[in-house]
């Protein structure tokens, strides 16, 4: 019998993941799916092993409700497609963990997009040879490497929209940019039902959505792994 309010987790290959093993799963695979969740149970579960990272559009409880006409400008509050991206990519230290819960699916479209950048190790090795040749530049001309080492681990920050865009500073950077663009254009598509969603390592797995019709409602939570957790190293990135 399923316990009322309990969230179940599974891998992309449909293997069970214990709630207490999610951080270990993210360390190895970058993303896990979850089922039977509410915004309250998801927030409570995430609070058991992470520290809230506050997004400018979030409510005081740390949750951002993304739906068309949500009262805030931006593509997330529309029915438009959102390309695979790193959440808060344009700041110095993006959060390590993103949890996304679909409360109300779209009538049509609205599939989730996932891209595991660690799947192209050659790309990452090439980018790390000179991190400054490919940078993410925001509207205020702040620049951060798209691929960088942090604490001995790897971080990827990528988005290509009005908030920030990748810029190659030389021919070698153009090679890296073309490869990461190609990777972002071949995402894994997921049709996510009500009460379901995913948790991902934000430094490794890009996420987005296709355009949709209807009143699709999604709740997002950003976090870092708690400093007392054995896998707090996830906050520094992932290993090749």
Image (cartoon, rainbow, N blue to C red):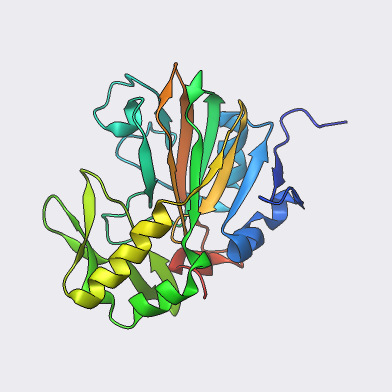
Above/below status of 43 relative to 87: above
Residue 235 versus residue 111 in the image, above or below: below
Asked where in the image residue 157 lies, by quadrant, the reply is bottom left
Q: In the orientation shown, which residue stands out farthest toward the left?
A: 140
Identified at 24% across, 28% down, the residue is 73
Percent position of residue 232, x then y: 53, 66
Determine which quarter of the picture holds residue 25: bottom right
Residue 229 seen in render: no
Left or right of 12 in this view: 204: left
Residue 122 x, y percent position in the rendering: 45, 76
Q: Quick check: can you spot residue 200? A: yes
Of residues 197 and 48, the one drawn nearer to the viewer in this rendering? 197
Residue at 54% from the left image edge and 34% from the top image edge: 101
Q: For the image shown, how many numbered marks are present on the structure?
A: 0
Q: Is residue 4 left or right of residue 227?
A: right
x, y percent for residue 231: 58, 66
- Quadrant where the image shows the N terminus: top right
Q: Residue reaching furthest bottom?
A: 129
Q: In this rendering, is residue 157 above or below 208?
A: below
User: For this rendering, which residue is in front, 79 or 16?
Assistant: 79
- Comparing 174 with 89, the one in front is 174
Q: Residue 158 appears at what percent x and percent y?
A: 33, 57
In screen coordinates, is 141 left or right of 41? Answer: left
Give the residue at the far right of this rendering: 1
């Amino acid at each position: 019998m399923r316990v009322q309010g309990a969230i179940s987790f599974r891998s992309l290959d449909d293997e069970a993941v214990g709630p207490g093993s999610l951080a270990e799963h993210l360390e190895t695979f970058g993303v896990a799916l979850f089922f039977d969740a509410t915004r309250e149970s998801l927030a409570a579960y995430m609070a058991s092993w992470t520290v809230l990272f506050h997004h400018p559009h979030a409510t005081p409880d740390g949750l951002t409700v993304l739906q068309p006409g949500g009262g805030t400008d931006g593509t997330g509050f529309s029915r438009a497609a959102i390309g695979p991206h790193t959440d808060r990519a344009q700041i110095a230290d993006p959060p390590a963990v993103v949890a996304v819960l679909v409360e109300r699916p779209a009538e049509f479209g609205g599939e989730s997009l996932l891209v595991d950048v660690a799947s192209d190790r050659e790309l990452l090795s090439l980018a790390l040879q000179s991190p400054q040749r490919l940078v993410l530049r925001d509207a205020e001309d702040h620049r951060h490497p798209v691929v960088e080492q942090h604490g001995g681990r790897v971080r990827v920050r990528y988005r290509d929209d009005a908030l920030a865009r990748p810029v190659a500073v030389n021919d070698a950077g153009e090679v890296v940019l073309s490869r990461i663009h190609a990777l972002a254009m071949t995402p894994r598509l997921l049709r996510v039902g009500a009460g379901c969603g995913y948790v991902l390592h934000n430094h490794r797995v890009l996420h987005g959505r296709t355009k949709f019709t209807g009143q699709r409602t999604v709740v997002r939570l950003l976090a870092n792994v708690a400093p007392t957790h054995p896998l707090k190293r996830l906050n520094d990135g992932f290993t090749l």
